[in-house]
Amino acid sequence: MQAGTPEERVRQLFQALLDAFGPQHWWPARTPLEVIIGSILVQNTAWTNAEKALHRLRSARALSLRAMRSLPLFELEQLIRPAGFFRQKSRTIQSFVAFIDREYAGSLHAMARQHTNVLRLQLLGICGVGPETADSILLYAAQHPVFVVDAYARRVLFRHGLIAEDASYTDVQKLGSAALADYLVAVSHPPTHNLDSHTPTPMSRKTKSQAVEAFNEMHGLLVAIGKRFCRKAAPDCNNCPLLALLPLSARARVPGI
């Protein structure tokens, strides 16, 4: 069990996860637009379902802004049906395309050069884009240093006594940002746990700033631990690589331990 400030403990969690699982090669995508569309498709569903929808879009040669502009709404809905909520997500995708054309003359590169706070507010103004989706776009498509907060991050940090169960998105993000903004990602040995990571892709191979790399890896690692060990209903704490970092006072938060 480790002690320290909340920020120090988050760094301990991060290094333990990195030692256990190694780099996660997230986000699995070929282009920034594919990241953006994927971040919309994965809302309220498993990544495997979003992948199916992305595959259908790719097979239909619809994963480009030019194709999206001319694709009828009904056809888009049918292509992304495997991701669920396909009507709502189709409208969000079309709204994003209209946004990028209106604000940045159809240039994702120009969008990525915008100031983080300005771009985040613009993204949040798109119907169907909430904080997690906006921050995923900022981090993975635009390479901005933003800590993404999802259900896995909340679960792990809450169970380790680092946040309140009802902590706001902003509060969780502030903790993650303060802990990892200056953290150097260092892999010194092969992973200790045999857990499949994503195959490297052009987007995951992109050169990143130190902060972007740390936020990127932490998000992927929290997803990995949340799926394999820190499950919502049946956590496998006894075999979890983070067990040594779980304070005794926090164990009451974890069902079944």
Image (cartoon, rainbow, N blue to C red):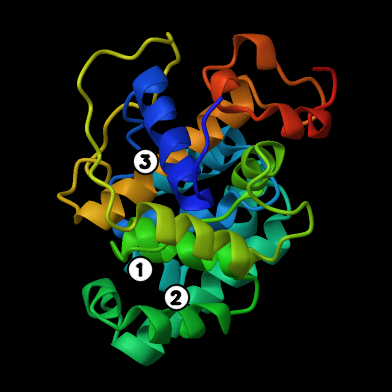
Residue 256 can be seen, yes or no: yes
Q: Position of residue 160 (x, y in %)?
A: 65, 37
- Give the numbered dot on residue 103: none
Figure check: 34 above or below 98: above
Query: Could you tell me how far apart the alpha carbons at marks 3 and 2 are, in whole angstroms?
Result: 28 Å
Q: Quadrant of the C terminus?
A: top right
Query: Label 1, on which residue?
Result: 65
Query: Label 2, on which residue?
Result: 97
Of callouts 2 and 1, the N-terminal one: 1
Query: Mark 3: which amino acid?
Result: Glu
Q: What residue appears at the point 25 percent right and 39 percent down from the top-left corner? A: 185
Q: Is residue 55 left or right of residue 234?
A: left
Nearer to me, 249 or 51: 249
Query: Mark 2: which amino acid?
Result: Val
Mark 1 residue element:
helix
Q: Is residue 39 left or right of residue 229?
A: left
- The answer to whether mark 2 and mark 1 are in CB contact below 8 A is yes
Nearer to me, 162 or 98: 162
Q: Position of residue 113 (x, y in %)?
A: 23, 78
Of callouts 3 and 2, the N-terminal one: 2
Mark 3 residue element:
helix
Q: Position of residue 193 (x, y in %)?
A: 43, 10
- For label 3, count other residues whose C-alpha is less than 10 Å away and answer few (under 14), some (14-19) or many (20+): many
- The answer to whether mark 3 and mark 2 are in CB contact below 8 A is no
- For label 1, count other residues whose C-alpha is less than 10 Å away and answer few (under 14), some (14-19) or many (20+): some
Q: What residue appears at the point 61 percent right and 31 percent down from the top-left corner? A: 226
Quadrant in the rendering for residue 130: bottom right
Figure check: 4 above or below 93: above
- Give the numbered dot on residue 217: 3
Query: Mark 1: which amino acid?
Result: Leu
